[in-house]
């Protein structure tokens, strides 16, 4: 009998799509997944997998809904106001620099009226309470609202409303929600983290902001992985997906590169993951 297995997919803009080839590898190996958890972009992929979407179809789904106009239009007057420039307007705490309607429509198209508690495989989505900064774990409720709340990268996107709370990007509080798998006493936890070489200089605000968020997530992820080696009774495998350069959250054209990196690391970690699961199952 196979031991229990959890997949935890970290935040990282659109880079968590690289987890899809790893999910395909696990399927090819006949490995059953008992629990998914995700934060920010990782929540999007975890939710797809938890719903039972065929892994082979996931890249096409991502390509169909992620398009260059997804993160437009930019509210220029709000941007000017954020920078304190003439002609700008104040940015409210529940507003964003980007009109979220296209992002919300894309999420609605994929997840429809699904609910977290009704997914085929148990799922937890991490987000951040926009008013307090506390981490919020979502295990019940409308999947569309949970996913949007987890990816709402304020101030770029406005926070999302969920069960009386305003939620913003899960990466602000818990970039790699390993704790949710610990709480369920999972035997083997596979944490998929996204890492990239951080440039010292960027030529625009979005690039600098993305680099800052990546560096913050990296430190949080390292701390959680270290804590996991002490607390977890089973096996913790941290699959570090190394990206050769920074990929911004709106860099849709990089999807082929992201999937290529996922395939490379799926083969890199195949033997380690399979051996750990077989060892815990014996």
Image: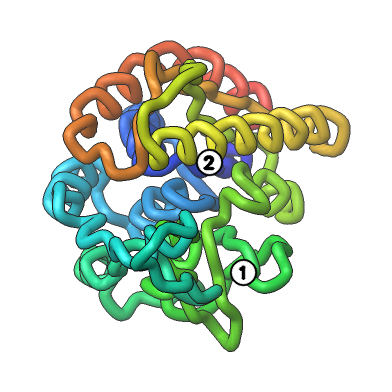
Q: Is residue 201 visible?
A: yes
The number of callouts visible is: 2
Determine whether 227 is above or below 34 in the image.
Answer: above
Mark 1: give few (<14), some (14-19) or many (20+) Cα within 10 Å. Answer: many
Identify the disc placed on residue 17.
Answer: none
User: Dot 2: few (<14), some (14–19), or many (≥20) neighbours within 10 Å?
Assistant: many
Residue on which the image places disc 1: 130
Is 23 positioned to the left or the right of 228 in the image? left
Q: The residue tagged with tag 1: helix, strand or loop?
A: loop
Q: Position of residue 219 (x, y in %)?
A: 69, 31
Left or right of 109, for residue 225: right
- In the rendered structure, the answer to whether residue 229 lies left or right of residue 62 reads right
In-image side of 136 versus 38 (left or right): right
Tell me the quarter of the image containing the C terminus.
top right
Residue 178 rendering spot, x and y as whole percentages = 67, 44
Taking depth in this image into account, of 204 and 193 the one nearest to the observer is 204
Q: Which residue is mark 2?
A: 10
Query: What residue sits 47% from the left and 55% below the top?
Result: 83
Expressed as whole percent of the image width and height from the top left, the position of residue 205 reads 41, 40
Residue drawn at 35 percent across, 75 percent down: 114
Mark 1 touching mark 2, by CB under 8 A?
no
Give the farthest residue toward the right.
230
Q: Residue at x 55, y 43 (%)?
A: 8
């Amino acid at each position: 009998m196979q031991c229990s297995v959890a997949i935890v997919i970290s935040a990282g803009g659109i880079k968590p799509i690289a987890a899809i080839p790893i999910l395909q590898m696990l399927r090819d190996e006949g490995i059953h997944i008992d629990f998914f958890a995700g934060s920010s972009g990782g929540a999007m992929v975890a939710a797809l997998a938890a719903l039972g979407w065929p892994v082979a179809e996931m890249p096409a789904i991502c390509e169909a809904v992620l398009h260059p106009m997804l993160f437009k239009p930019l509210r220029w007057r709000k941007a000017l106001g954020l920078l304190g420039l003439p002609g700008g307007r104040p940015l409210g705490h529940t507003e964003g620099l980007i009109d979220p309607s296209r992002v919300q429509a894309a999420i609605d198209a994929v997840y429809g009226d699904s609910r977290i508690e009704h997914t085929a495989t148990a799922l937890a989505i991490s987000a951040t309470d926009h008013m307090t900064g506390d981490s919020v774990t979502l295990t019940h409720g409308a999947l569309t609202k949970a996913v949007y709340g987890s990816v709402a990268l304020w101030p770029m996107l406005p926070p999302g409303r969920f069960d009386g709370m305003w939620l913003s990007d899960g990466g602000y509080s818990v970039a790699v929600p390993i704790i949710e798998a610990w709480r369920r006493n999972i035997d083997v936890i596979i944490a998929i983290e996204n890492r990239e070489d951080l440039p010292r200089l960027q030529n625009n605000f979005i690039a600098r902001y993305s680099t800052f968020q990546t560096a913050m997530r990296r430190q949080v992820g390292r701390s959680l992985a270290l804590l996991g080696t002490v607390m977890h009774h089973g096996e913790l495998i941290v699959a570090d997906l190394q990206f050769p350069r920074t990929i911004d959250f709106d860099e849709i054209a990089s999807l082929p590169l992201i999937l290529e990196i996922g395939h490379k690391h799926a083969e890199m970690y195949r033997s380690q993951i399979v051996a750990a699961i077989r060892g815990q199952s014996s």
